[in-house]
Image: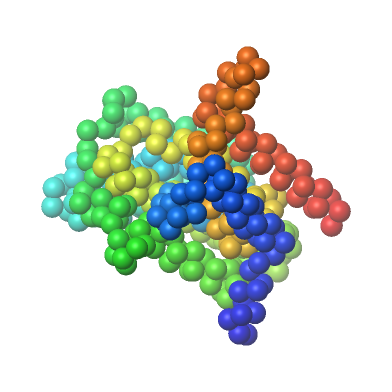
């Protein structure tokens, strides 16, 4: 199969629409601020999008299964806090060396618990992962005593978040590119990818055909936890520290980006290229909302809506709208 055919298959209708919306938003932004189309601004937006893109990579696989991972806010926090606090757990020498893998491993362990609960205990993913989010929050509050962590990011974490291994390409963007290429290859060429789609479409039939669907679900939840923790590591390196609730702003944008990219929230259908488009679209939309500030028009009518609240409303409307669309399509099929 030629490369052009493989690439063409990644661009379904939803992906094309998402990329078209990105172009429209950039053109609208350029009318307000010409710098919107400058290479510096575009790279800056891709740099910002890469944080969301890494966490969305894991969550997308879980959604392809027909499940959901609501533990990502505090899994992000766990990844950042454990990476910056690695010297306290592993000692100064090993802590500096293993800070990043230690943070990612802690997130993978949360994903492992999620996977065991959903796959083997057959608990509803929404309830179980939400409970794990609360558990992770409690553990981090206990770890910090309720105060802001005093640990700082290591030099490697800083370089990972703000450095440029390849000139002109921020390291987080490079990480997202490598991660995305691996996921696209897995979903299209490996047995695991075909099984993920199959489980999302009809888990019972796949199980009866002899496939251990529990291992597929477990692997995706572990990967989701590791991706969320990696985002926490990058955010900690970006800010030079970790902080409580650092992952809270990422839950709704992550889900919104995935469904905007055409991934069926009921499972079984979706392209990773669509998730890339959704992540970029959400990032540009956030930037637009910050610059244009449409909530100020409501203020003229006597309705004062904070910017963060307005963004959450926009993301919520997007998720509900896409859920209704995909839900109707599922009923039709």
Residue furthest out toward the bottom = 1
Q: In which quadrant of the rendered image does the C terminus lie? A: bottom right
- Measured as percent of width and height from the top left, residue 157 is found at 26, 51
- Measured as percent of width and height from the top left, residue 169 is found at 36, 62
The structure residue drawn at horizontal position 20% and vertical position 51%, both measured from the top left corner, is: 155
Q: How is the image coloured?
A: rainbow
Q: Examine the rendered structure and indicate whether residue 149 appears above or below residue 284.
A: above
The structure residue drawn at horizontal position 32% and vertical position 52%, both measured from the top left corner, is: 161
Of 282 and 284, the residue lying toward us: 284
Name the side, left or right, on which 137 lies relative to 128. Answer: left
Of 114 and 61, the residue lying toward us: 61
Q: Is residue 117 visible to us here? A: no
The structure residue drawn at horizontal position 58% and vertical position 68%, both measured from the top left corner, is: 187
Of 21 and 202, the residue lying toward us: 21
Residue furthest out toward the top = 302
| Quarter holding residue 171 | bottom left
Q: In which quadrant of the rendered image does the N terminus lie? A: bottom right
Residue furthest out toward the right = 332
Q: Is residue 32 visible to us here? A: yes
The structure residue drawn at horizontal position 63% and vertical position 14%, both measured from the top left corner, is: 302
- Measured as percent of width and height from the top left, residue 222 is found at 47, 54
Residue furthest out toward the left = 93
Report the label total. Answer: 0
- Measured as percent of width and height from the top left, residue 154 is found at 21, 49
């Amino acid at each position: 199969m030629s490369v052009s055919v493989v690439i063409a298959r990644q661009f379904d209708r939803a992906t094309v629409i998402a990329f078209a919306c990105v172009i429209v938003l950039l053109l609208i932004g350029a009318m307000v601020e010409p710098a919107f189309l400058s290479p510096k601004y575009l790279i800056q937006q891709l740099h910002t999008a890469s944080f969301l893109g890494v966490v969305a990579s894991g969550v997308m696989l879980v959604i392809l299964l027909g499940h959901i991972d609501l533990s990502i806010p505090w899994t992000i926090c766990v990844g950042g806090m454990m990476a910056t606090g690695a010297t306290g757990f592993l000692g100064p020498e090993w802590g500096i060396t293993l800070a990043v893998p230690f943070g990612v491993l802690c997130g993978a362990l949360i994903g492992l618990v999620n996977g065991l609960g959903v796959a083997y205990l057959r608990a509803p993913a929404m309830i179980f992962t939400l409970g794990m989010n609360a558990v992770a929050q409690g553990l981090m509050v206990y770890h910090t005593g309720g105060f802001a962590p005093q640990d700082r990011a290591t030099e490697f974490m800083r370089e990972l978040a703000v450095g440029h291994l390849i000139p002109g390409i921020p390291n987080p963007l490079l990480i997202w590119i490598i991660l995305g290429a691996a996921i696209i290859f897995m979903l299209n060429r490996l047995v695991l990818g075909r099984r993920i789609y199959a489980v999302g479409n009809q888990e019972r039939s796949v199980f009866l055909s002899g496939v251990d669907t529990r291992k597929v679900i477990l692997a995706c939840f572990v990967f989701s936890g590791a991706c969320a923790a990696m985002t926490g590591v990058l955010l900690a390196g970006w800010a030079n520290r970790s902080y409580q609730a650092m992952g809270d702003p990422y839950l709704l944008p992550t889900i919104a980006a995935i469904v905007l990219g055409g991934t069926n929230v009921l499972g079984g259908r979706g392209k990773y290229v669509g998730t890339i488009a959704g992540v970029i679209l959400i990032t540009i939309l956030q930037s637009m909302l910050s610059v244009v500030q449409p909530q100020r028009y409501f203020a003229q009518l006597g309705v004062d809506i904070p910017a963060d609240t307005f963004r959450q409303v926009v993301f919520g409307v997007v998720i509900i709208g896409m859920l209704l669309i995909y839900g109707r399509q599922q009923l039709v099929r």
